[in-house]
Amino acid sequence: MSKKNVLDFIRMKKEGEKVAWVTAYDFPMGMFAEQAGMDMILVGDSLGMVLLGYKDTIPVTMEDCLSHCRAVRRGAPKTWIVGDMPFGSYQTSDEDAVKNAVRFLKEADMDCIKLEGGVRVASRIKAINEAGVLVMGHIGLTPQSAGQLGGFRATGRDVKTARSLIEDALAVQDAGAYSILVEAVAPELTEFLTRKLDIPVYSIGAGVKCDGQLLICGDMLGQFQAFTPKFVKVYANIAETCTNAFKQYISEVKNEEFPTDDHVYPRKDSLEDFQKLFDEYS
């Protein structure tokens, strides 16, 4: 398996080949995704909810993101990996945005970064891109600003909000982003943006007519139990599997069914020799 690069993703858009990607937050999940042949991986700030138990992504720090990015990179050395810039790492200034974006490459070996927003972050995208860091945009339902949207709500379902998202998408492209993620918008809008933009357009809950699909690993594997978005297809039920395994383990421990002789290290000397040793201390 050879690692894809930005030219591969542009080619895939031109040739109509879909990009399949997921989030991952640790070494094992990165390894599983790479072994499956995933085109790319996002180390999303969604780790705050999926792994750390926060109610949203706002508390996630740069150190959180960098630590998990490094772990995923160790698990998936041959996969294109996107580092997600957390809330507060790029909102304050172009200079802060560049400094923090660079850290993802220098300290975690990411291939690019992703940040949320359209028109309002165009200068950030431009500055990061001019510093030599590839940028993926993210519009639609943007979790870091979900409070301004009234919660985790779909958007772009009416002409007014769709127009605003078109302007956002164009601003992201014009600022130099190499691709864009569209979240929880009407599929007709996603299809239009895919035709309109020269850069790849990826969907998470935004329809099939685009250049590829993203899902949160905790959602698609049935690991994250707080809620399941409408757009998620659950491909496994890790939570049920783990809970049942824990229940069986508890039962076997309490009934002395585990460990058996197969799970222990047998003595090398005779039982008589051991008994003499024990007698010394009795």
Image (tube, helix red, strand yellow):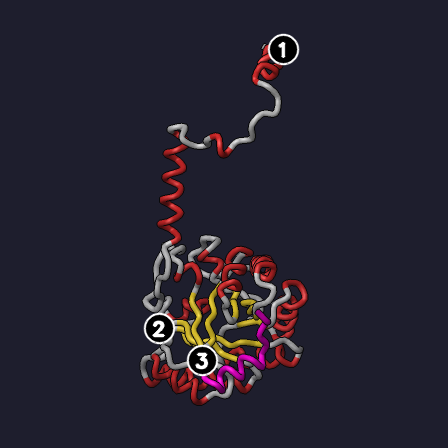
Q: Residues within 10 Å of mark 1 (few under 14, many from 20)?
A: few
Task: Give the x, y percent position of residue 278.
Answer: 59, 14
Q: Is residue 59 above or below residue 17?
A: above
The answer to whether residue 92 of the structure is visible from this angle is no
The answer to whether residue 268 of the structure is visible from this angle is yes
Instruction: Tell me the element at label 1.
Output: helix
- Looking at the rendering, the stretch of residues picked out in magenta corresponds to 1-16
Q: Looking at the image, which is closer to me, 192 or 41?
A: 41
Instruction: Tell me the element at label 3.
Output: loop
Instruction: Tell me the element at label 2.
Output: loop
Question: Tag 1: residue type?
Answer: Glu
Q: Looking at the image, which is closer to me, 245 or 1?
A: 1
Q: CA distance from mark 3 to mark 1?
A: 74 Å
**Residue bearing mark 1:** 280
**Residue bearing mark 3:** 211
Residue at the image position 50 percent from the left and 58 percent from the top: 29
Q: Is residue 195 above or below residue 118?
A: below
Q: Is residue 6 above or below residue 89?
A: below
Query: Which image quarter: residue 124?
Result: bottom right
Q: CA distance from mark 3 to mark 2?
A: 20 Å
Give the position of the C terminus as an image quadrant: top right
Question: Tag 3: residue type?
Answer: Asp
**Residue bearing mark 2:** 154
First reached walking from the N terminus: tag 3 or tag 1: 3
Task: Let me know if residue 181 is in the magenta part.
Answer: no
In the picture, the disc for residue 58 is none
Q: Is residue 5 left or right of residue 139?
A: right
Residue at the image position 37 percent from the left and 58 percent from the top: 236
Task: Give the x, y percent position of residue 157.
Answer: 32, 79
Question: Tag 2: residue type?
Answer: Ala
Circle 3 or circle 1, nearest the eye: 1
